[in-house]
Amino acid sequence: MMSDRVMLGIDRIKCDGHGVCADLVPELIELDDWGYPIIRSGAIPQSVLPHARRAVSGCPTLALRIQSLATRR
Amino acid sequence: MSIALLAGPPAVQGIERYADHQRRLGALPPATELIGSIERSALRGKGGAAFPVATKWRSVASQRAGTPVVLANGGEGEPLSRKDRMLMEQRPHLVIDGALLAANAVGANDIVLYVGADHAGAIQTMQRAVSERPGTERARLRLVSAPVRYVSGEETAAVHFVNAGIALPTSIPPRPYERGVDGRPTLVQNVETLAHVALIARFGDEWYRSLGVAGASGTTLVTVGGAVPQTVLIEIHQGMTLADAVNVAGGITSDSDAVLLGGYFGGWIQSGAAWGLSLDADPLHRLGHSLGCGVVAVLPSGRCGVIETARILAYLAHESARQCGPCTFGLRAISAAAGRIAGLTSTPGDLERVQRWSGLLAGRGACHHPDGAAGLLASALHVFSGEFTLHDDQRRCSIVNTQAVA
């Protein structure tokens, strides 16, 4: 898993649009007009991975996850 | 409007009783080798996604955790579709045969027949049909009436309702084929698809393929409405053109600029480009279209595409399960702005916002509800672009002679 290419996944039902993720990893996430995350598609670059992990652990509703690029959604 | 789906020997008119059904088609055949046969038949799911049926069945059959369950999906929440309820009303035993064959093929014991609560006729005939079956089959069949709601028929919502009485979509993973009814691998399959299976199992995949035209396989049920004499259910040879389908339905009753293909989850197509389209999943997909759950709605000449689109968006926004932010708030905002444009009361920037938002919804819900709405909207912005601009810029509708409609 660690060697696999990974991406951000999100549980849309859990997400309440707090927006913490967009602050922690703006390279990968921007917010739409209603404050909900739009996630950049594709693999997370190695350099951004620590920030992505921080966003995952910082999500107040635990809606964010890091998953294999092969797993969709 | 005969349902031949039910091809093979001629069917009894009206509701088919079990004895007639057996006399016509014989006993339930074994399900051995059925998945291979279905694969060769090229049968796709008829619920809207056109997913290859054999692939789905294999995914369920290969699960190791628990005995699978089959959920025959007759929720039919699409407002423009009639096919599933009419099929269940007229050929309930074909649906039950298909569900039993599916269960036997994937190693399931229990079968849930999931029927929309508002389809009273279908519930009644399915109930009676179950009671006519032998005790060993009856013991495996459970009829569940689905709440009247657009998303009730979404597969995770169906599973959620059977498990917990809540007909709302759940997050994936897990998908139903991994963990569904009672936590067991669950095959959720549209009732029409199952009826086709009941025929393929009896007459073979070669026979089934021979029913298609223009390289397509089999037949398909289509609800044709709008500018035709009346809304009708027809069964067409897969691969026939949209014009063929409309002609079978009695032909158009007025000029028409656009056709809504695939229902509320589908898209608008300019009539000139629509008539020649082959009604088959692959060629439609290559052009970015979909037959969805088999809906063809011809826009009558006196109706405005912008107004119709706003009406559909309002419905879809109202029917959102309101579980995911982009669908709850995004769809509501889109619907409100589209409603203002349709009603000639747009505020500055409405059309630009709707255009931008239409690209923002896809893939951003637990289910595909926002994707469906976004697809419909994108097609409308393309097909009715001039009319949208006229409504927004000049507060004028070229078709409906009124001010402030909505």
Image (tube, grey):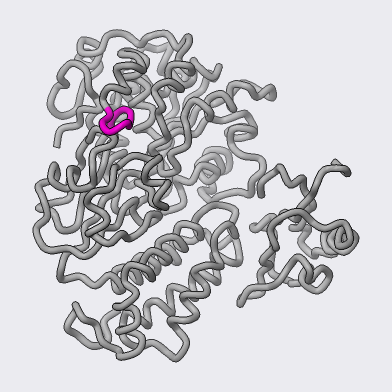
The image shows residue B201 at horizontal and vertical percentages of 37, 15
Figure check: B305 above or below B289: below
Q: Can residue B100 be seen in this view?
A: no
Picture quarter with the N terminus of chain A: top right
Prevailing secondary structure of the magenta residues: loop
Count all numbered tags in the image, as a single digit: 0
Regarding residue B278, the answer to whether it shows in the image is yes
Task: Please report the bounds of the magenta region as a residue range.
Answer: B212-219
Q: Is residue B213 left or right of residue B292?
A: left
The percent coordinates of residue B385 (x first, y second) are: 34, 74
Q: Quadrant of residue B372?
A: bottom left
Residue occupying the point 45% across, 84% down: B350
In the image, B166 versus B154, the foreground residue is B154
Q: Which residue is drawn at 76% across and 61% down?
A: A61
* Residue B251: percent from left, percent from top: 10, 50
Q: Residue at x 31, y 86 (%)?
A: B344
Residue B333: x percent and y percent? 49, 76
- B293 inside magenta stretch: no
* Residue at 43% over, 39% down: B50
Residue B340, relative to residue A39: is it above or below?
Answer: below
Q: Position of A69 compared to B206: left or right? A: right
